[in-house]
Amino acid sequence: EMKIEKDIPVPPRGNKPHPWEEMEIGDSFFVEESPEASMKQIQNTMFTSIRHRRKDLPEGYGISTRRWPRGKPYGIRVWRVK
């Protein structure tokens, strides 16, 4: 059975969860693995996000991701490379 709830605001569209526009070549950020998001899912999300933001980014913009098991927490490091 689903519970109906009232007065829950709809989040605004166009929120930018990733800092693509602010990143310069060589910059990186870390996304921690969680029970809800495996490292592979995080990598897929990063590349999907870039694909959807392509029109807002400089031509040739590129990222590289690596699994980051160097100590804990585990996750994905994302670099801007182009």
Image: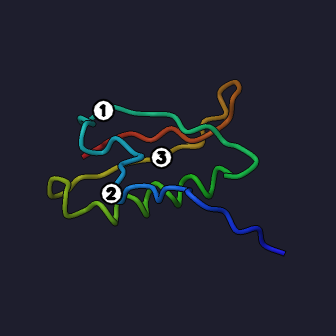
The percent position of residue 28, horizontal first and vertical second, equals 39, 33
The quadrant the N terminus occupies is bottom right
Pointer 2: residues within 10 angstroms few (<14), some, or many (20+)? Answer: few
Q: To which residue does mark 3 refer?
A: 65
**Which kind of residue does numbered mark 3 sit on?**
Thr
Expressed as whole percent of the image width and height from the top left, the position of residue 5 reads 66, 63
Q: Is residue 3 left or right of residue 8?
A: right
Label 1 vs 2, first from the N-terminus: 2
Question: Which residue is tagged 2?
Answer: 14
The label nearer to you, 2 versus 3, is: 2
The residue shown at (25%, 37%) is: 22
Using the image, tell me which numbered label, if any, was put on residue 80.
none
Identified at 68% across, 35% down, the residue is: 74
The amino acid marked with disc number 2 is Gly
Q: Is residue 74 above or below residue 11?
A: above
Where disc 1 sits, the SS reads loop
Taking depth in this image into account, of 14 and 82 the one nearest to the observer is 14
Q: Specify whether 44 is left or right of 49.
A: right
